[in-house]
Image: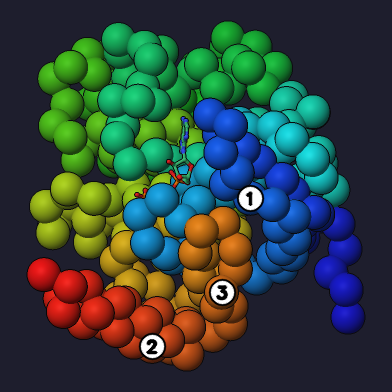
Amino acid sequence: MTAPPRLRVDLTDVALARDGRPVFEGLSLTLTERRVGVIGRNGAGKSQLSRLIAGLVRPDRGEVRVDGIDVARDRRAAIRSVGILFQNPDHQIIFPTVDEELAFGLTSLGLTRAEARARVTATLARFGRQDWAGRNVQTLSQGQRHLLCLMAVLAMEPATILLDEPFAGLDLATELMLNAILSALPQRLIHVTHDLGALAGYDRVVWLDAGRIVGDGAPAAVIAAYRAEMAERARHAGTEF
Ligand SMILES: Nc1ncnc2c1ncn2[C@@H]1O[C@H](COP(=O)(O)OP(=O)(O)OP(=O)(O)O)[C@@H](O)[C@H]1O
């Protein structure tokens, strides 16, 4: 059965070039699962795919719809619908204090200042970080900044959350804590990662290579094929020295 528009991500015949070089040339993909992993080598197009789905990049051709919304054109609806977490929180955080950072997205959604303040307080309480109210972001550790970015995304209550390698470089305890929060979320997660183990319980894994989908299906099968292919490439690379 075809899922209704509000439960799907649809890329239709998407073409995208960066600096004059094609990244995608006619990519079509429909995602209806709650947990989707995206894997592939460096430069395969995973981050550009995330940005397309978040509506941060506009395709040169084709369209990207999330739950029926054309995310590149309807930015107001898109920020309600899709949140994205990047690898480096410092690329995401723009305000000097925790409260301002959390409130910014909420006022962009149209909440009044008082409503945004109340939602910020509730969000901090949800994560047991009431003591962060008014705190300068500079005083937070890297892991705490990741958590702040996650809180900022969750405060906006998007139905879809994109994770673009958000946990690279975190210590194990922080990574486990953030993973526990994420796995309990009811939202749809689309997770770009090189950490193949993180995708074990996922519903679907998409393997990108040079902007094309070369593997797609249950995590165990796609990841096994990916590992085998990477091992084979490494073996050949080894004989060339
Ligand atoms: N801002 C940019 N300007 C020009 N080219 C870009 C830009 N961002 C990405 N690209 C190119 O687009 C292609 C896909 O890059 P992308 O960042 O999506 O790869 P990735 O799969 O996320 O890689 P990684 O695993 O290294 O993060 C690459 O060829 C890259 O050089």
Residue denoted by label 1: 24
Can residue 87 be seen here?
A: yes
Image marks 2 and 3: residues in contact by CB distance under 8 Å: no
Q: Is residue 45 left or right of residue 94?
A: right
Mark 2 belongs to which amino acid?
A: Ala
Q: Earlier in the sequence, mark 3 or mark 1?
A: 1
The three-letter amino acid code for the residue at tag 1 is Phe
Which residue type does callout 3 highlight?
Answer: Val
- Foreground of the two, 117 or 21: 21
For disc 3, the neighbor class at 10 Å (few under 14, some 14 to 19, many from 20) is some
Instruction: Assign the C terminus to one quadrant of the image.
Output: bottom left
The way the protein has been coloured in the rendering is: rainbow
Q: Look at mark 2 in the image and give the residue it sits on.
A: 224
Q: CA distance from mark 2 to mark 1?
A: 25 Å
Q: SS of the residue at dot 3?
A: strand
Question: What residue do we see at 13% from left, 57% from top?
Answer: 173
Q: Position of residue 154 (x, y in %)?
A: 50, 41
The residue located at (56%, 38%) in the rendering is 21
Q: Residue furthest front?
A: 240
> Badge 3 is on which residue?
214
Counting from the top left corner in percent of width and height, residue 29 is at 72, 63
